[in-house]
Amino acid sequence: MASHNGTKHLAPMEVSVEAGNGGGAEWLDDDGRPRRTGTFWTASAHIITAVIGSGVLSLAWAIAQLGWVAGPAAMLLFAFVTYYTATLLAECYRTGDPDTGKRNYTYMDAVRSNLGGAKVAFCGAIQYANLVGVAIGYTIASSISMQAVSRAGCFHKRGHAVPCKSSSNPYMILFGAVQILFSQIPDFDQIWWLSIVAAVMSFTYSAIGLSLGIAQTVANGGFKGSLTGISIGADVTSTQKVWHSLQAFGDIAFAYSFSNILIEIQDTIKAPPPSESKVMQKATRLSVATTTIFYMLCGCMGYAAFGDKAPDNLLTGFGFFEPFWLIDVANVAIVVHLVGAYQVFCQPIFAFVERRAAAAWPDSAFVSRELRVGPLALSVFRLTWRSAFVCVTTVVAMLLPFFGNVVGFLGAVSFWPLTVYFPVEMYIKQRRVPRGSTKWVCLQTLSVACLVVSIAAAAGSIADVIEALKVYHPFSS
């Protein structure tokens, strides 16, 4: 393993100076690109980083809407759907032969080479809109966590009855400034260490949330919650219960979504044997299983601790006040993780725009000239475009401070096309599954069932956003 890690440091740095002439063929893969060095473990780390995001913290709320029966059942169902469709998608990394076929570098390339036509534009629009949405959601989430750190200190000093209000805008601006710096790192390959740090952080805060949930449950002397979730009464009307249950489905679907960056992650795996799709399927199995166990524990313990009162975000909704330093550690871990995850999700957008620009203006020094400073590669174009992107997402985040609803909506809208529809269609095309055969019918049934879930969850989130807009003032969070 050690020698492998040694090459891992060298290979990308040596070659990325100028991909074409990195010292002969042994540095290059079959497509003439710098040799890929990823393994089963790095792919698993990338997936876990992408999946165990801030979504884990809203799961207690989601289970509270659905109850002890439907909540865990919905989680297992989405885990299975995500895993199954991810294995279909992994087969589409190479077109034709699984070992030597033409590689697809991005999700859109896979759609282009398998389906083509208008579907490519539809896929691109949804994928990039979803990634921009994730960037905005992460900016909001990190500011909420930073705010929670200052509030926890204030509650500790001045007692729990004091409101301890503060604006989240300065925290969003701070997060944006850090992202402008990090977004100058040019390649996905060169931030593998960021993924590992982020994965460790996500385990840290989830474990703290979990242990506080267990401690609270023990203190309560038993499990709270009911089989059917929040009961309809004075606080919750029956229509709200329906909308919230649908939104909970959206939250759970979003908590698992990583298929939109699966091909990009697969593109970091070293050349066969074994084929990339086999390695990726193993990595997916490990990651989805790990994540599911984790989600079940965090979501269920949070619900057991608070019952119907489970907050929208376990560590910032102040379900817990003490020990305040532990909550601070968890929130700092969330912020560090989100800094890394933001990059993981934004790199595909950056790469897409830069490829387009390089193709459109190949002779422009503004676009192509680079200055290397350590891991950063500064080009005037990259500096202006990436910084502008971060600034725009930060401003939008300040305008839309209701995190939960935005997350639910994004999850719902992108869940069906990216996680289910395209993988199923591409697999049918690639494997030439005959129309009308049992397998074809099963795959299409799965697709339609997920479409219904997607539409219902999106409707639930829109209803909630409309509620939130009634009492909303911009920039006043």
Image (cartoon, rainbow, N blue to C red):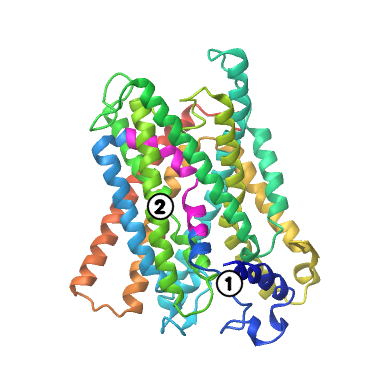
Magenta stretch: give its range: 45-64
Check the image and name the residue furthest to the bottom: 25
Asked if residue 49 lies in the magenta stretch, the reply is yes
Q: Quadrant of the C terminus?
A: top right
Name the residue tied to disc 2. Answer: 290
Q: Is residue 16 left or right of residue 318?
A: right
Asked if residue 255 lies in the magenta stretch, the reply is no
Residue 422 has which mark? none
What amino acid is found at the position of numbered circle 1 in the picture? Answer: Thr
Helix, strand or loop: magenta stretch: helix
Q: Is residue 90 above or below residue 156?
A: below
Q: Is residue 463 visible?
A: no
Residue at image x 63%, y 28%? 167
Name the residue tied to disc 1. Answer: 37
- How far across and down, in percent of the image, does residue 331 sit? 57, 35
Q: Is residue 49 visible?
A: yes
Total label count?
2
Q: Is residue 1 left or right of residue 56?
A: right
